[in-house]
Amino acid sequence: MLKEGLNPDDFDQNDDSNFAGKVLMATVKGDVHDIGKNIVAVVLGCNNFKVYDIGVMCSCELILEKAKEYKVDVIGLSGLITPSLDEMVVVAKELSKGGFKQPLLIGGATTSKMHTAVKIAPNFTTLEHPVIHVLDASRSVTVVSSLLGENKGEFVEDIMEEYEEMREDYYAGLEDRYFLSFDKAKEQRMTINFDESPPPKTPNKLGVTLVDSVSIQDIVPYIDWNPFFQTWELRGRYPNRGYPKIFKDETVGKEA
């Protein structure tokens, strides 16, 4: 400011017009853990986002009240313990009832992309205000920037498509489940007759055995490269998801 000939005393601390965006951060009711949330706040702050951290044990009412008061662009919920997951669902429902339009970010050790997709997102997600799970603090800037940038529509559509597929997989898995009574389960327990099926004999050799007859080229066809692409956040659009189809994707195929 001094270089530009401006007086620091004239700077309005409440002026948020020069920030890239405004984010509300809160640890939900019943949870006092905030280390991860604090890291996210620092990372976002270092990237010119105005962060309103309203603390821990935040009730749903307080979160909604502060989101209105600060006129934020994004709302972030954090939690570590399992009950926090249910509280996040409550907040999402109330945001929907209240007509809020801000995207909702979910983070914390006990949260997951699957839980967000199945339990939280259906209560609030639209193209305008999606619900997105953020794996760790390093991803927060990318996610918030994408939500406030020109390519928000494409980014949100991709997330919603992915979450819809996850929900379909989850519910399909439930259809295949059937449960036995405890007595029936005991009847199907595994019984071993050691006279008819004695334990395996002691190996001819104990310790490490070097197998040098297999080359790297022999192993390559069996390597699952999907974790590699996930780490680098390279994700093709349907039907070009996963290895090796990702190479055909128009957007990320070349990078992959």
Image (cartoon, helix red, strand yellow):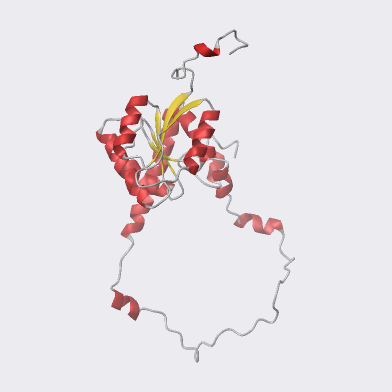
Question: In the drawing, does residue 72 fall left or right of residue 179?
Answer: right
* Residue 4, image x, y percentages: 60, 9
Question: In the drawing, does residue 139 fall left or right of residue 98?
Answer: right
Question: In the drawing, does residue 181 fall left or right of residue 137?
Answer: left
* Residue 183, image x, y percentages: 29, 78
Question: In the drawing, does residue 61 fall left or right of residue 131?
Answer: left
Residue 130, picture quadrant:
top left
Taking the spot 33% from the left edge, 61% from the top edge, the residue there is 176
Task: Identify which residue, 79 or 166, lies in the foreground.
Answer: 79
Work out whether 215 lies above or below 146: below
Residue 65, picture quadrant:
top left
Q: Quadrant of the C terminus?
A: top right
Task: Identify which residue, 166 or 129, lies in the foreground.
Answer: 129
Taking the spot 54% from the left edge, 42% from the top edge, the residue there is 246
Taking the spot 43% from the left edge, 26% from the top edge, the residue there is 22
| Residue 70 visible to the viewer | yes
Residue 43, picture quadrant:
top right
Taking the spot 61% from the left edge, 85% from the top edge, the residue there is 201
Name of the residue lying farthest toward the left: 97
* Residue 116, image x, y percentages: 38, 45
